[in-house]
Image: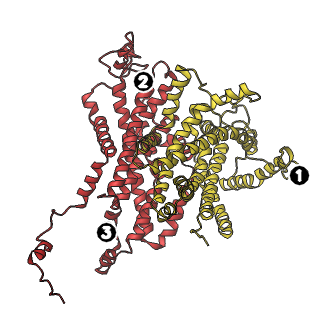
Chain colours: A yellow, B red
Amino acid sequence: MLTFTIRRLILSIPTLILISFVIFMLLQLAPGDPMAQVPLTVPPEVKQQMREALGLGEPVLVQYAKWLRQVFLLEPAVFIDWLTRDTLLLGWLPDTSLYNGDLRVISWQTRSPVMEIVMQRIPQTLWVVGLAYVVGILIAIPVGIYSAYRQYSVFDQAGTFVTMIGFSIPPFFTGPLLIVIFSVQLGWFPSIYDTTHVVNDWDSFMVQLSQMIMPVMVLALQITAQFSRYMRASMLDNLGQDYVRTARAKGLREAIVVNVHVLRNSMIPVVTVIALGVPAIFGGAIITENVFKVNGIGQLLITSLFANDLPMVMTLTFIFAALIVLFNLVADVLYGLLDPRIRYD
Amino acid sequence: MTEPVPASPTAIDALADDGPEAPPRSKWRDVWEQFTRHKGAVAGGAFLLFITLAVIFGPWLWTLDPQELDIRNKDLRPIYVGLWNGDAAISWAHPFGTDNLGRDMLAQMISGGRASLAVGWAAMLLSVLIGTAIGVTAGFFRRLDGLLMRLTDLFLSLPILPLLLVAVTLFRQPLRANFGPEGGMFILIVTVIGITSWMPTARIVRGDVLALKEREFVLAARSIGTTSWKIILRHLLPNVLSPIMVSATLGLATAIITESALSFLGVGFPSDYPTWGKMLADAVARMVDFPERVILPGVAISLTVLSVNYLGDGLRDALDPRLRGR
């Protein structure tokens, strides 16, 4: 298992480099110039220097190599420095100061390091989308279990119908619909997510809760639809197996048969699917973030795309790709760990 | 010692079959019967057929031009609003109302549906074509298998929606210049959806082909000198048709949603060219006063996708021989 994990980790490096190369080359085709806003009175040689300050004005392959160095060497160095300097977790370690002041990946919009902006945006995304993921899974698993146990019952039929609806109604429709109903007509929840809101007492916590409910519910509907289907299918596969009959025959109570024996075996594929869906937490909520004006990474990607901020787009897309590769690996390893029948070696 | 009972002639008569009791049944009739037993699938198929016919023949039945501005009749509500709101501005000339420039909503819904469904069908066909080609090649030719499957894995680990957005923003200008604003966007959107959604089809087809090509009928075909190309066309493709059809329906649903999502985010078709996603996105700003402008296209998208999903569900059950006949 360990050798398999290590082999896959090493194999994922060329994959990531290839993906980043593809994205980089794609972005090279983009029209637009970061110097377009600079006044015409600025002499060309100054413009050239400004270009170089942004890491431009060199052959494409050199730019790509520099980008690789920035992302794989400089940014981790900055991150480790930050960990040992400012965080509680590793703050007791001596300051590492690995970062030597070289040029980091610079955003064309704000002229500040891309990763700093990303780090500012990640908490909002994680809170809203991550919470939706947890809520969705918590709803989906019991629903899946019960509709498989009572297959073709009214509950199962209704569950299947709701699942289908969750699959079919896109978030850019449910979002505005919820806003009209709950913000405009009923006035229960704010329609815009206020990121600057600080939670410091019970009242502000309730405000935070009420502004999170709608985006979380929109996302949770889709997540529930997806996972309750997997859960149901997986439970159905296991309920017909011989060991279930054995467990019943030896006199175990039905609750134990279903909730312990069958559930544990049915969770194996579901857990891996849950792991595979984690990258979507970061990337897939672009539309929901846009509808509710949550300034997370999805919204950052959209704004930087429209503002032609290529380093930002490049880095964000690469982060999404890296997460997908990582969680594919996690899913494979989990599958091997949970199911003793599967051996990779 | 008992006498052996002489076999009664009537028993032998009873055992003998003088012919099959029922006429032979073809596979597709079985499939059809199983399919019609799934009520949701039948309803879904019927609705999809209805909406497809409506957007194809609608412009002949409802002859108003969706682009015609009629500023005197702007902001009309749909006629059903009159049921509970007697003061609402409604007109029988515009049953779904008009938008803020006086364009007829029904005509826009028809032409928007045309665009959405055309993109959906075209993108689905493209992705099924690529997926089948890659899947069959990878499954049949062992030497290409590793390479093609690594390619599939690579595509699967690309973040699709961000890349779609990047591709559409980057290639919009050159394609518009070459094929006109609408044609260029159509080609672009269909292509990017097609080349980012073929991977599931390819994987399923490859798996099936790998199993099928070890079967005796392929060996028999090969032993009488059939070329690989003929084996693929005559023996393999008909056998992998059912998983392809199922993944095609799912592909149609995804393509329609993806196109609407792109339009919603503002990177889809030009603003004077309605699609359902575009109409929904444009109406969100005035949703409080005119909720129907969000609800009509939204319901249209959702119902279409819902019916396609039910159709796919029914097809999967009907085409699976293990489920059929139960």
Q: Are marks 1 and 2 on the same chain?
A: no
- Residue A272, how many percent across, how many down? 58, 56
* Mark nearer the viewer, 2 or 3: 2
The vertical placement of B70 against A143, above or below, is above
- Residue at screen point 74% across, 29% down: A198
Nearer-the-camera pick, A265 or A332: A265
Q: Is residue B40 visible?
A: yes
The vertical placement of B64 against A38, above or below, is above
Residue B144 placement, left or right of B324 = right
Task: Look at the numbered disc 3 and give the secondary structure of its residue.
Answer: helix
Nearer-the-camera pick, B216 or A239: A239
- Residue at screen point 44% across, 29% down: B279
For label 1, the residue is A93
Asked whether the residues under the numbered discs 2 and 3 touch, taking CB atoms below 8 Å apart as contact, a structural biologist would say no
Task: Write down the chain letter for disc 2.
Answer: B
Tell me which label, 2 or 3, sits earlier in the chain: 3
Residue sitting farthest toward the left: B9
For badge 1, the amino acid type reads Leu
CA distance separating discs 2 and 3 = 51 Å
Q: Which mark is residue B292?
A: 2
- Residue at screen point 77% across, 52% down: A76
- Residue A123, how many percent across, how many down? 70, 39
Residue A84 placement, left or right of A187 = right
Task: Write down the chain letter for disc 3.
Answer: B
For label 3, the residue is B235
- Residue A157, how many percent across, how many down? 40, 43
For badge 3, the amino acid type reads His
Label 1: how many Cα within 10 Å (few below 14, some 14–19, many 20+): few
Q: Quadrant of residue A45?
A: top right
- Of the 4 image quadrants, the one containing the C terminus of chain B is bottom left
